[in-house]
Image (cartoon, helix red, strand yellow):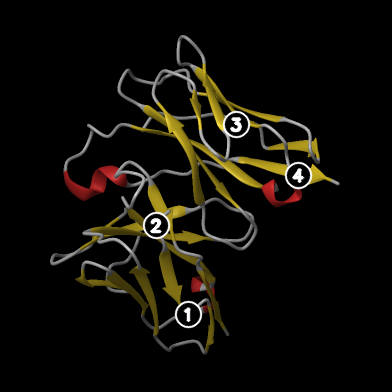
Amino acid sequence: DAKTTQPNSMESNEEEPVHLPCNHSTISGTDYIHWYRQLPSQGPEYVIHGLTSNVNNRMASLAIAEDRKSSTLILHRATLRDAAVYYCILRDPLLFSGGSNYKLTFGKGTLLTVNP
Amino acid sequence: GAVVSQHPSRVICKSGTSVKIECRSLDFQATTMFWYRQFPKQSLMLMATSNEGSKATYEQGVEKDKFLINHASLTLSTLTVTSAHPEDSSFYICSAPGGFEGTDTQYFGPGTRLTVL
């Protein structure tokens, strides 16, 4: 899977929007952009994923650059419960056959701190 | 969303003993599950891919004789840490792909904190 680059940490205030950037300049045409987050002492949880178009769900929005070399995860109103490590991961579902194509390679992610 | 459970959530054992960790997909079937290990302040590292009805696939550098994986059914995978030593103390997390949101997402268990004395 292609590599992503994220800031080590970011800080936000409660109830303000948060924009978490991710650079993936070597992304291939079939790579999906996935975001997961890990709250302290818990397993990661899926946040959102997309290919080319911007995506919205109940947790967040994903804005993908036109050239797909970067993306931004948007939390519209941060809460204290959003404090976590956010991972941006590229996945090519066509690269492998069988169940192994779902494995994820985690980078260091961005530690988001939310101030009350 | 889909639910993956792990048991136990926390275990403390003496050096040299074996510890079994269970990973269950509660409301969906998983022919494949993944086992990760996470040391403090570090990211998750994939250890192995658990395949229902066949042998697990281990990542480079992971000892298959030390970390035994059994995927006996479509909803259960177990990881046994054999002859555990203090350096095996870590946070072990399993995951399974699929569930209700489609097969391109992973659902993670809550993790098992292993402490080897």
Could you say which is closer to the camera, residue A15 or residue B94? A15
Find the distance from the CA under tag 1 to the CA under tag 3.
33 Å
Mark 1 highlights which residue? B8
* Residue B94 coordinates in the image, percent (x, y): 40, 62
Name which of mark 3 and mark 4 comes first in the sequence: 3
* Residue A45 coordinates in the image, percent (x, y): 50, 51
Q: Are marks 1 and 3 in contact (CB under 8 Å)?
A: no
Label 2: state its secondary structure. Answer: loop
As drawn, the label of residue A113 is: 4
For disc 2, the neighbor class at 10 Å (few under 14, some 14 to 19, many from 20) is some
Chain at tag 1: B
Q: Which quadrant of the structure image shows residue B16?
A: bottom left
Residue under the point 42% across and 19% down: A26
Badges 1 and 3, same chain: no
Task: Tell me the kind of residue under disc 2.
Answer: Ala
Residue under the point 55% across and 39% down: A58
Look at the image and tell me whether residue A34 can be seen.
no
Chain at tag 2: B
As drawn, the label of residue A6 is: 3
- Whether B17 is drawn above or below A79: the answer is below
Task: Tell me the kind of residue under disc 3.
Answer: Gln
Find the distance from the CA under tag 3 to the CA under tag 2.
28 Å
Q: Residue furthest left?
A: B53
Find the distance from the CA under tag 2 to the CA under tag 4.
27 Å
